[in-house]
């Protein structure tokens, strides 16, 4: 209710300045070095693009993993880690499997060969539902340049697999041309796009999801994809 400020949040979940943590500001950025609102910064895409060139990459042995999510058979995560920096992130357990010194939420590594591995796996027919983004966000800022999610969608289109995407980013609208090329709204080969939302307040979201696009942009993206004929949904969490 009313205006939200950081002091309204418990100390343990107050957002840290991600610009300072990531050092993602480009050399021509005019924003302060202690800026903590990537989601509302007009320079954010350029800042991230400049940083991505220095990001470590990794190769994967498999693209599709068996999923324990109810209703899903497979999961696909084009990145290890995520820079959305959500203070409530459940995927922080991934830290145990990486030797990265940076705090969780401030780093990500692209699986540079994932589309090629996926194509190899789908050379033999598979069936079921695929969840894109179970322990990362497939449309985090790095995707703008790396394009791994887009390449994976090209492989999945026409595979007969049902695809469900969950994201906090309006960058997914970039791939509307591929999403609309999938099958019908229901059944084999269909695709649906979900947006994760925990608040409709852009100001509050900037505190607890400081690296993600604001909810207003997510809702605009949902409306645009729905108008284009893509099945959409909303995941409200944490609740």
Image: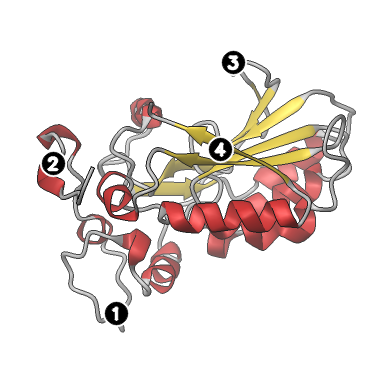
Q: Are marks 3 and 4 in contact (CB under 8 Å)?
A: no
Q: Where is 129 relative to 234, above or below?
A: above
x and y percentages locating residue 228 in the rendered image: 76, 57
Counting residues from the N terminus, which is met first, the one under dot 1 or under dot 2? Answer: 2
Which residue position is annotated with label 1?
29
Residue placed at 70% from the left, 51% from the top? 226
Front residue of this view, candidates 11 and 92: 11
Real-space CA distance between mark 4 and mark 2, rounded to the nearest whole angstrom: 26 Å
- Judged left or right of residue 107, residue 170 is right
Residue placed at 58% from the left, 56% from the top? 221
The quadrant of the image that shows the C terminus is: top left
Residue placed at 82% from the left, 39% from the top? 185
Which residue position is annotated with label 3?
68
Structural crowding at the residue carrying mark 4, measured as other residues with C-alpha within 10 Å and reported as few (<14), some (14–19) or many (≥20): some
- Residue 125 lies in what quarter of the image? top right
Which residue position is annotated with label 2?
8
Q: Which mark is residue 234?
A: 4
């Amino acid at each position: 209710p009313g205006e939200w400020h950081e002091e309204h949040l418990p100390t343990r979940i107050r957002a840290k300045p991600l610009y300072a943590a990531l050092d993602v500001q480009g050399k021509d950025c005019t924003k302060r070095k202690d800026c903590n609102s990537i989601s509302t910064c007009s320079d954010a895409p350029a800042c991230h693009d400049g940083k991505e060139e220095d990001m470590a990459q990794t190769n994967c042995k498999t693209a599709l993993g068996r999923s324990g999510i109810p209703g899903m058979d497979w999961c696909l995560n084009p990145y290890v880690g995520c820079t959305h920096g959500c203070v409530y992130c459940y995927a922080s357990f991934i830290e145990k499997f990486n030797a990265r010194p940076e705090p969780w939420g401030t780093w990500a590594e692209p699986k540079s060969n994932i589309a090629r591995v996926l194509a190899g796996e789908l050379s033999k027919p598979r069936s079921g539902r695929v969840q894109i983004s179970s322990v990362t966000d497939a449309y985090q800022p790095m995707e703008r340049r790396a394009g791994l999610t887009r390449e994976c969608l090209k492989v999945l289109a026409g595979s007969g697999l049902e695809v469900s995407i969950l994201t906090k980013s309006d960058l997914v609208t970039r791939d509307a041309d591929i999403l609309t090329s999938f099958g019908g709204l229901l059944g084999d080969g269909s695709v649906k796009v979900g947006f994760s939302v925990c608040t409709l307040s852009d100001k509050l979201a900037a505190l607890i999801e400081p690296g993600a696009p604001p909810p207003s942009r997510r809702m605009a993206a949902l409306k645009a994809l729905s108008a284009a004929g893509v099945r959409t949904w909303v995941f409200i969490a944490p609740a």
